[in-house]
Image: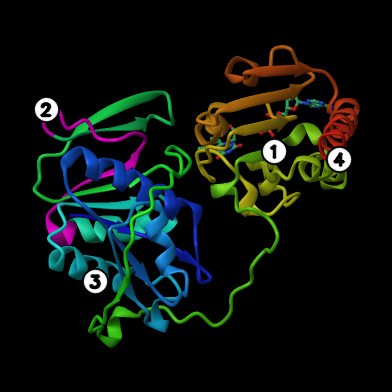
Amino acid sequence: MILVFAELNNGSFKKASFEAIAYASQLAAKINTQVCALVLGETSDAASLSAYGAHKIIQVADARLNNVETKAYAKAIVHVASQENANVIVFSNNITAKAVAPRVAAKLKAGLVAGAISLPDVSNGFVVKKSVFAGKAFAFVQVSSNVKVISITPNSFPVQKAEVPTNVVPQTIEFAANDFAVKVDSVNKVSGIVPLSEAELVVSGGRGLKGPENWGILEDLGSSIGATLACSRPVADSHWRPHHEHVGQTGGTIRPNLYIAVGISGAIQHLAGVNSSKTIVVINKDPEAPFFKAADYGVLGDAFEILPKLTESFKKFKAAQNA
Ligand SMILES: Cc1cc2nc3c(=O)[nH]c(=O)nc-3n(C[C@H](O)[C@H](O)[C@H](O)COP(=O)(O)OP(=O)(O)OC[C@H]3O[C@@H](n4cnc5c(N)ncnc54)[C@H](O)[C@@H]3O)c2cc1C
C-alpha cells in the first residue's frame, strides 16, 4: 500500500495534495499496489480524493488536527502507515512535510527523499530523482529501506484525474495531551490570492523598482494575469514588501509555470528559489544582469516604461479572448 498524506488548508485540500495522490497512483500502478489517502482534520470534502486515484480514504476528523500539529500528525501518519502496511509514504514537500516527514521516517526507520521531482525508477531497486545544489544538479537516490518516505516538490507533478469508487473510512487515534504542544490563538489569512507555493503565475520585483511607492505598476501587471507577487530579499529586508513574498535561498522556493522578474539582478541566492520555474521572463535595464543567462525571454529596458505597456497588452489580450 502507498499512503499519501492529503493535507487540508482551512477544510479544503491543497492542490499539492492532489498532485501527491496522482503521483502515488502512478507509482502504485508501477509497483502493483494501491493508494490510501490519509486526511487529518475536519472536512466534508474527503470523498473527492477518489477522483485522483485513491483506492481508500481514511479520515481522522479530530478538530485538534485542523491546525498543523507536527507531533500529532506524525503519530497519526505512523499509526495508519503501520495499520495499512504501507511501504511507501508520500507527502508534498511543503512546510508541513518538512516538519512531519522526517519524524515519520525516523519512527518507521524509513529512508526519506525530500523534494522528489519524478516517479521513482523501480527497474533496479528504488531510485528517486531530486534537485540538489539549488536546482543546479540532480541526485538519484537509491532507497533501500523497507519503508520509504518521499516528499514531492510542489508543481513538479501534474494533477491527474483517475476516478476510483471508494468511501471515506473514519478513524480515531488516541492522542496524548502532550501531542498538542502548540495553541493557536488566532490566524490572520490573506484571502483571494493564490499562495506563492501553489502559484502558477508569479510576478516578482527587485530593488530596480526603487521603492515601495512604485509597487502599483507591478500589482497592476500581476492582477492583469492573475499572478501572485514575489520579491527579492533586499526588498523584503527594506520592508518594501512583506517577508512571505521573499523568494530565494533564504526565502520561498517556487516552481510556477511563469516567473516574471522585474528589476532583479539574478544573484545566485535569488535564482536558488526560482530557477525551476517553467518559463522565466526577465525585465532589466542592464544588459549584463546575470538573470538574463537564466531567462527564457529577456526584455532589455526600463521597467517603468515596459510594465504599463505589458499590462495594457495583457488586458487587451484578455478582453479579446472574452469578447
Ligand atoms: C547568504 C545570503 C542569502 C541570500 N538569500 C537571498 C534570497 O533568498 N533571495 C534574494 O533575492 N536574495 C538573497 N540574497 C541577496 C542576493 O545576493 C542579492 O543581493 C539580491 O538578490 C539582490 O536583489 P535585487 O536583484 O533586487 O537588487 P540588485 O542586486 O540591486 O539589482 C537590481 C536590479 O535592477 C535593475 N534595475 C535598476 N533599475 C531598473 C529599471 N528602472 N528597470 C529595470 N531594471 C532596473 C538593475 O540593473 C539590477 O540588475 C542573499 C545573500 C546572501 C549573502
Q: Residue furthest top?
A: 287
Task: Say whether residue 62 is magenta.
Answer: no
Residue indicated by mark 3: 75
Residue 288 visible in the displayed image = yes
Q: Position of residue 70 (x, y in %)?
A: 34, 68
Q: Is mark 2 within 8 Å of ligand 1?
A: no
| On screen, residue 8 above or below 285 | below
Q: Nearer the viewer, residue 65 or 185?
A: 65
Q: Nearer the viewer, residue 1 or 55?
A: 55
Sequence-wise, the earlier of marks 2 and 1 is 2
Separation (CA) of disc 2 from disc 1:
42 Å
Separation (CA) of disc 3 from disc 4:
47 Å
Q: Position of residue 109 (x, y in %)?
A: 12, 55
Separation (CA) of disc 2 from disc 3:
32 Å
Sequence-wise, the earlier of marks 1 and 4 is 1
Residue 232 visible in the displayed image = no
Residue 116 position by quadrant:
top left
Separation (CA) of disc 2 from disc 4:
53 Å
Sequence-wise, the earlier of marks 2 and 3 is 3
Q: Which residues are magenta?
A: 106-125
Residue 4 position by quadrant:
bottom left
Which residue: 53% across, 40% down? 254
Within 10 Å of disc 3 (Cα), the crowding (few <14, some 14-19, many 20+) is some
Residue indicated by mark 4: 217
Q: Position of residue 250 (x, y in %)?
A: 51, 43
